[in-house]
Image: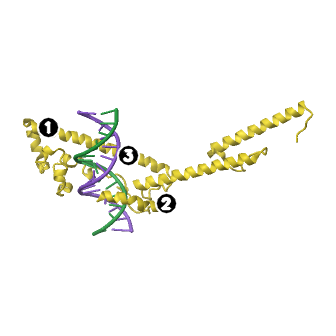
Chain colours: A yellow, B green, C purple
Amino acid sequence: MCGSSTTGGPSSSSGALDQTNFAPFTSSSTEEGQIPGRRTPLGAVGLGGFYFQGCQPNIASHGPPSDENNPDPADSTQTNRPQHSRASQNSQNANPSKAKNRQGKSVRLNINARERRRMHDLNDALDELRAVIPYAHSPSVRKLSKIATLLLAKNYILMQANALEEMKRLIAYLQGTAGGAAIVAPPGFDLQGFPAAAKFLQQQQALQAENARNNEGGNNGGSAGPL
DNA sequence: TAGGCCATCTGGTCCT
DNA sequence: AGGACCAGATGGCCTA
């Protein structure tokens, strides 16, 4: 049951990922020719299945698919169809049912191609997700599995949310305690990567400058001195 | 060799 | 009707 493997997978793999281990897989000596976890070449997996190959050995050797993989029930009599597909194609023009059968096959091929494209898009999106979540991006490090990518991304989002909350609390604290004192970034602290904090500091400095001007104006115009 | 992961095929269901 | 989405089935590849 391959399906059960995926259902059981998350619980087991999430445990490892909860440890914020960003390189869950150990490096291995594979590479060359085939990157582990990489999409296998279409031909290697038997592109087109029964409908492309006249008789695909690796699949046709298995009993069950013969009937189940048939596109339509009307075709169920052709369990050995692949063997003589060419010959049957030549005679299809004379037989309406076979012509319809061939059309059914082409429809099925279109559906298969669409599904393949859809899965490729999904995998592309997963690749983009892998690119932005923090883990060891290296040729020597095995690519994150799909489930590991999703779980790691989820944890990363939660971590970022927590960091954001913490930052908000810190800013609120600074706003509350700063009072009239000048707020400056610590020496050597680069605010380039913190636009929100930089903006906040700019606002504070502008506010203080304005207060200073007001005080100055008040001093000039009035007799009351600063406190 | 077993288990994990993946790609593909396939039929069903829902939506436009 | 056609397309998107989904889940099950199947077989291949890789690793421990």
Position in image of residue A184 (x %, y %): 74, 46
**Position of residue A136 in the picture relative to residue A73 (left or right):** right
Label 2: few (<14), some or many (≥20) within 10 Å? few
Please tell me whether mark 1 or mark 2 is closer to you in this view. 2
Q: Secondary structure at mark 1?
A: helix
Give the Cα distance between marks 3 and 1. 33 Å
Whether discs 3 and 2 lie on one chain: the answer is yes
Residue at 41 percent of width and 60 percent of height: A11
Whether discs 1 and 2 lie on one chain: the answer is yes
Looking at marks 3 and 1 on the same chain, the residue that comes earlier in the sequence is marked by: 1
Q: Identity of the amino acid at label 1?
A: Lys
Q: Quadrant of the C terminus of chain A?
A: top right
Residue ranking furthest to the right: A223
Q: Quadrant of the N terminus of chain A?
A: bottom left
Q: Secondary structure at mark 2?
A: loop
Position in image of residue A220 (x %, y %): 89, 32
What residue is disc 1 on? Answer: A100
For residue A69, above or below residue A11:
above
Q: Could you tell me which chain the residue with mark 3 belongs to?
A: A
Please tell me whether mark 3 or mark 2 is closer to you in this view. 2
What residue is disc 2 on? Answer: A18
How many marks the image carries: the answer is: 3
* Residue A113 seen in the current view: yes
Q: Quadrant of the rendered structure where residue C15 is? A: bottom left
Position in image of residue A210 (x %, y %): 78, 35
* Residue A44 seen in the current view: no
What residue is disc 3 on? Answer: A122
Label 1: few (<14), some or many (≥20) within 10 Å? few
Q: Secondary structure at mark 3?
A: helix
